[in-house]
Image (cartoon, rainbow, N blue to C red):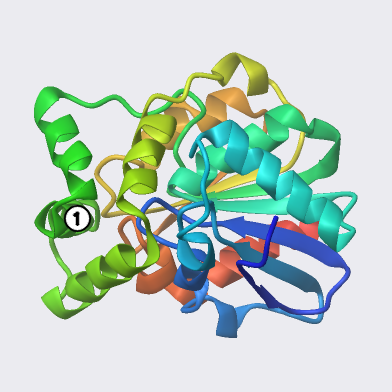
């Protein structure tokens, strides 16, 4: 994987954190000050078409993104590593697990997309599929997925980051990749430490969805519901999120 990543920490437990559809490697910055860099080494890469890789060509599929993650792990000398995936990144991390199960130590999903994708009705698909070219759609989605409760200043900043950090064609391609994901059978029953963290105000990828997907797929999957958070706990409740992530990953050492 070419340059296009941020790193935090020098610890012996490597962790690769995979961003969401509206994010980039930089989207993890609100969380970074609260991470234990003496115990963990965190890497925050961009996908093709995002961040420092915005001009890089690609097919923008989960398989390609997972292959790039494994190439990055090879480049950094990570034989085994843990994964964190936010939203779309939750689907990417599970694709990595399906392709290289012996290399994944543990997984933490933050409002993660299941391996079976996300169903949409006609109106919802029109909203999401139109977001590649319409900033208003992006803002409406972010507002909806955080419970229509947060300041417009933050919503506008999230939209700006998304527009500046993603190629519209890649953005559109990745929607089909995660929404129509269909590799549930490849990950069902995998034995490894898994935790999902969701916000109480996330209407789509919240507690009930996790119970019906991740907790059925992974034996012993832990579930934590963060109060005062929606789909973007990285921004909304970073201290609580960092605590939940690292308390769990420490048990996987």
Q: Position of residue 37 (x, y in %)?
A: 74, 80
Residue 144 showing in the rendered view: yes
Outermost residue, bottom side: 33
In the image, what residue occupies the spot 32% across and 70% down? 161
Give left or right: position of 121 versus 34.
Answer: left
Q: Position of residue 180 (x, y in %)?
A: 39, 24
- Please tell me which residue is depicted at 69% across the width and 21% down the height of the picture: 189
Classify 99 as above or below 4: above
Disc 1 is placed on an element classified as helix
Tell me if mark 1 has few (under 14), some (14-19) or many (20+) residues whose alpha carbon lies within 10 angstroms of its own: many
Which residue lies at the image location 16% right of the left edge and 60% below the top edge?
139
Q: Quadrant of the N terminus?
A: bottom right
Q: Is residue 106 visible?
A: no
Q: Is residue 39 left or right of residue 234?
A: right
For residue 43, which quarter of the picture? bottom right
Expressed as whole percent of the image width and height from the top left, the position of residue 134 reads 13, 53
| Residue closest to the eye, 193 or 178 | 178
Q: Residue at x 54, y 35 (%)?
A: 62
Picture coordinates of residue 177, whole percent (x, y):
43, 32
Q: Locate the C terminus by quadrant.
A: bottom right
* Above-or-below relation of 23 to 221: below
Q: Which residue is mark 1?
A: 138
Q: Is residue 140 left or right of residue 12?
A: left
Q: How many marks?
A: 1
Q: Is residue 13 above or below residue 202?
A: below
In this view, the residue in front, 2 or 80, is 2
């Amino acid at each position: 994987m070419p340059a296009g990543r941020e790193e935090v920490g020098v610890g012996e437990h490597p962790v690769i954190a995979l961003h969401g559809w509206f994010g980039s490697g930089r989207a993890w910055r609100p969380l970074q000050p609260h991470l234990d860099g003496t115990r963990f080494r965190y890497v925050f890469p961009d996908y093709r078409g995002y961040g420092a890789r915005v001009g890089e060509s690609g097919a923008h599929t989960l398989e390609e993104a997972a292959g790039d993650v494994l190439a990055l792990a090879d480049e950094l000398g990570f034989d085994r590593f843990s994964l964190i995936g936010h939203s779309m990144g939750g689907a990417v991390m599970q694709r990595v697990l399906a392709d290289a199960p012996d290399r994944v130590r543990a997984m933490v999903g933050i409002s993660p997309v299941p391996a079976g994708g996300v169903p949409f009705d006609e109106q919802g698909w029109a909203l999401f599929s139109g977001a590649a070219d319409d900033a208003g759609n992006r803002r409406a989605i972010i507002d909806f997925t955080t419970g229509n409760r947060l300041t417009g200043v933050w919503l506008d900043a999230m939209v700006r980051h998304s527009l500046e950090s993603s190629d519209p064609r890649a953005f559109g391609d990745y929607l089909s990749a995660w929404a129509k994901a269909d590799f549930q059978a490849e990950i069902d029953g995998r034995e490894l430490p898994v935790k999902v963290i969701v916000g109480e105000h996330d209407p789509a990828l919240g507690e009930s969805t996790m119970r019906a997907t991740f907790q059925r797929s992974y034996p012993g999957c832990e579930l934590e519901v963060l109060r005062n958070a929606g789909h973007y706990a990285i921004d909304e409740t970073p201290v609580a999120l960092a605590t939940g992530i690292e308390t769990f990953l420490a048990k996987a050492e």
